[in-house]
Amino acid sequence: MIVPCWLSRAARAHPQRIALATPSGSLSYAELERRSAYAAAALAAQGVRAGDRVALLLQADEHFVVALHACLRMGAVAMPVDLRLAEDERRAQAAKAAVVVDAPIDEVGPAEARAGASHDLFHPALAVHTSGTAGAAKAVELTYGNLLWSAMGSAVALGLDAEERWLCPLPLSHVGGLSVLVRSAIYGTTAVLHPRFDAEGVARALAQDGITLVSLVPTMVTRLLDAGLRRSPTLRHALIGGAGLDPALAERARAAGLPVAATYGLTEAASQVATNGVPLFCTGVEIASDGEILVSGPTVAPGEAGPDGLLRTGDLGALDERGRLIVTGRKADTIVTGGENVTPWEVEEVLLAHPAVAEVAVHGRADPEWGETVTATVVLEPGAEVSGEDLRAHAARRLARFKVPKAVEFAEALPRTASGKVLRGALR
C-alpha cells in the first residue's frame, strides 16, 4: 500500500510551521523538506538505494533529523547507532549497514534534488537496536505501516492538538525518541528536540516553550522534580516509559503538577503498546497461561511476531477487570536502568576479563530513581585483591556508561542450582 511521503505532505500543507525546534534554532517544514531532499540526493550519489540500511552515527541534532528524513523519503532503512556505546559496539552495529553517515550530509546535492514522494507501508523504514532478552543487540526492522499505525494509535490515546509541541530529551537511537520525530512529521506538528537531557533546560522548556507533550523515563522525572519543576501551563501529558513508574514517584510528580501518563511499549511494537494501562486502539494485548504479555496488531514488526501473529514480550503482566494492563515483571534477566536495557552477560564478560575476577553475576536491583541499578556480585581469584571502584573503572573503559555497575559486591561463592545455574533472583 502506497501513501504520500509524510514530510512532503506536511511541507505542502504547512510550509511555514516549525517542524523541528532545538536549543540552537528551528526548521520550518519547507526548510526540512528542502534539506532532506538534498541529503537524499547526496545519499543516492553514494549508491544508496531503496531498502539499503544507512547507519546514522550523528549527534542528536538537526543534522540527524535531516538525515533521518532523507532516508525515509528515498526508501532507505535508517539505522541510528548510539554514540554512547563503546567503539567496538558502534563498529559492530554500523557493520550491518550499506553506508555509514557520520557527518552532516544536508548541505550538498544538486540544485534540482529529486526524490521519492511516497512510502510503501509494507517496506522497512527503521532498524532500531534493542538488547531484548536474548543477549546480543539485534536490529528490529519497523515498517512504514508499523510507524503510521503507532502514530494513529498514540493520537487516539493522547488526543492531537494542531499546535502540538512534543518535547523529546530521549536518545534518538531508541524507538521512544525516534517515534517523537516520526509522529510529528505524520501529524504535521512540531518536534522539540533537546540533544542532551539537562534537568534545568527541560524544566525551563516545559515552563516557557508551549510544550504540550513530553516523553521521559522515570530517572528524568526524578531529576526534573529535584530541579524544582512545577506545573507546566500548556502540558497535557508527560509520557513516562522505558521502565516501571514507581507509585511514590508518580504521586510526587502529580503533586508538582506534572500530568504523568505511564506507558508500556517495546521496540518490536514501534514504541507504545498501552498508555495508563489502556492498549492502543489498534493493538491487541493478551496474557498467556504463564503470565507473559502477548501483543498483536499492525504496530508489531513483521520479523518479530510468531507464526500465530503474536509478539512474545518476555514481560509478565495481568489485565484488570476493566481490561487495563498491569505489568508485574519480566521473564528474562534483562536489566532496565533509567530506560536503558542492559544484558547481564555482556557486563559479566567484561568483568571476567579482569585478572582478579574468578566469577561474577550481574543482576538488577530495585531502585526508586533508576527503576533498577546494575549490580555485580564478584568472586575473586584466591589471594587476589581489587576494589569495587577499580572494577567499575575497568568496566567503564569497555562499556557504555549506563552499563557500568553502580554497585560491586563481593562474595565467597555465587548461589547456584543443582545443575550449576546462577540464581540471579537470590542476588537481587
Image (cartoon, rainbow, N blue to C red):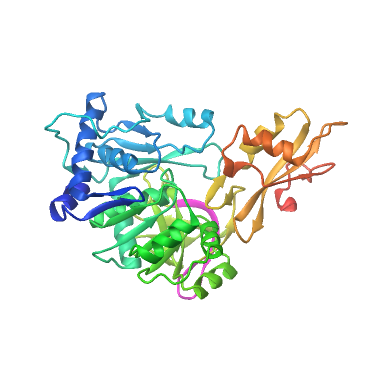
Give the residue displayed 73% in from the left and 47% down from the top: 423
Residue that appears at 52% across and 44% down: 132
As rendered, which of 201 and 300 lies closer to the eye?
201
Q: Is residue 236 visible?
A: yes
Using the rendered view, name the quadrant where residue 205 is placed. Answer: bottom left
Q: Is residue 32 left or right of residue 277?
A: left
Q: Does the magenta portion include 323?
A: yes
The residue at the far left in this view is: 112
Where is residue 92 shown, x and y percent of the image?
A: 48, 28
Find residue 194 and report its horizontal and vertical position in percent: 40, 51
User: Which secondary structure type mostly characterizes the magenta part of the structure?
Assistant: strand
Residues in magenta, as a range: 311-325
Q: Is residue 423 left or right of residue 307?
A: right
Q: Nearer the viewer, residue 412 or 257?
A: 257
Return the residue found at the far right. 383
Magenta stretch containing residue 44, yes or no? Answer: no
22, above or below 326, in the image:
above
The residue lying toward the viewer, choosing from 160 and 111, is 111
Between residues 235 and 144, which one lies in front from this camera angle?
Answer: 235
| Residue 52 at x, y percent in the picture | 30, 31
Rendered residue at 20%/31% (across/down): 41
